[in-house]
Amino acid sequence: RENLIHMLLISLLAALFSNFSNVFQNKQISEVSFYVMYLMMIALAINSFQVVIDWVSEGVTTISSFMSVFCPVYFVAVSIAKGSVTAVAFYNMVLFLIYLVELIISKFLLPVIHVYIMVRVLNHLSEEDYLSKFSELLEIVVSWILKSFVAGIVGINLVQGLINPAIDTVKRSAITRG
């Protein structure tokens, strides 16, 4: 709310300056005042974005901590329902996957998203598109990494669903034969 109030006040000041810019004979004063107001708005918007990035980082850490704590309970339930081999086979892999996804999101993707926002803002400071291709590259990289995470997790669940019944059947038949 505080940043929104500051943005509204800066917008009002910018409107006043643009209305009074006709008074000055030198148009450079109005252009300089426009850029100063624009930079102040950008600074407030980036500050708000940084608050959101910190909130998302804290959320990712909290969710991954919850999942790390919840995994033993889940795998005990799976071992009771389907067999112990199923739970043992994927317990360590899922914990490693949770840690890896948290690490990549919090240490790599969130800073890349922050750089992407800064590049997009800097690109709009001039009339020419100097940084548009770089911002598109960053957007594609982040998008593909997130899609790869989803595909990897769905793939692991799919493989687990296909392989585990066969492993449990082999285990039960070996126990029966023994």
Image: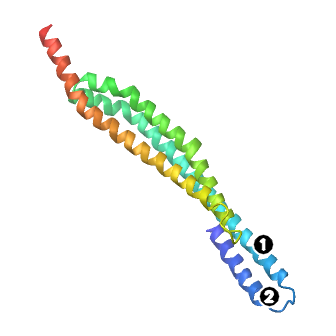
Residue 143 circle label: none
Q: How many marks?
A: 2
**In x, y percent, where is residue 151?**
38, 43
Instruction: Give the quarter of the image for residue 158.
Output: top left
Residue 21 circle label: 2
Amino acid bearing label 1: Val
Above or below for 113 versus 36: above
**In x, y percent, where is residue 134?**
61, 56
Question: At x 52% / y 42%, what residue is drawn?
Answer: 61
Residue sticking out furthest to the right: 25
Would residue 8 be found to the left or right of residue 106 on screen? right
Q: Nearer the viewer, residue 11 or 145?
A: 145
Instruction: For mark 2, give the secondary structure.
Output: loop
Would residue 139 be found to the left or right of residue 68 on screen? right
Give the mark nearest the N terminus, 1 or 2: 2
**Residue that badge 1 annotates:** 36
Above or below for 134 versus 93: below
Amino acid bearing label 2: Ser
Q: Nearer the viewer, residue 142 or 50?
A: 142
3D distance between C-alphas at marks 1 and 2: 14 Å
Above or below for 169 versus 46: above
For the C terminus, which image quadrant? top left
**In x, y percent, where is residue 165?**
20, 28
Question: At x 75% / y 89%, what residue is drawn?
Answer: 19
Above or below for 88 versus 151: above
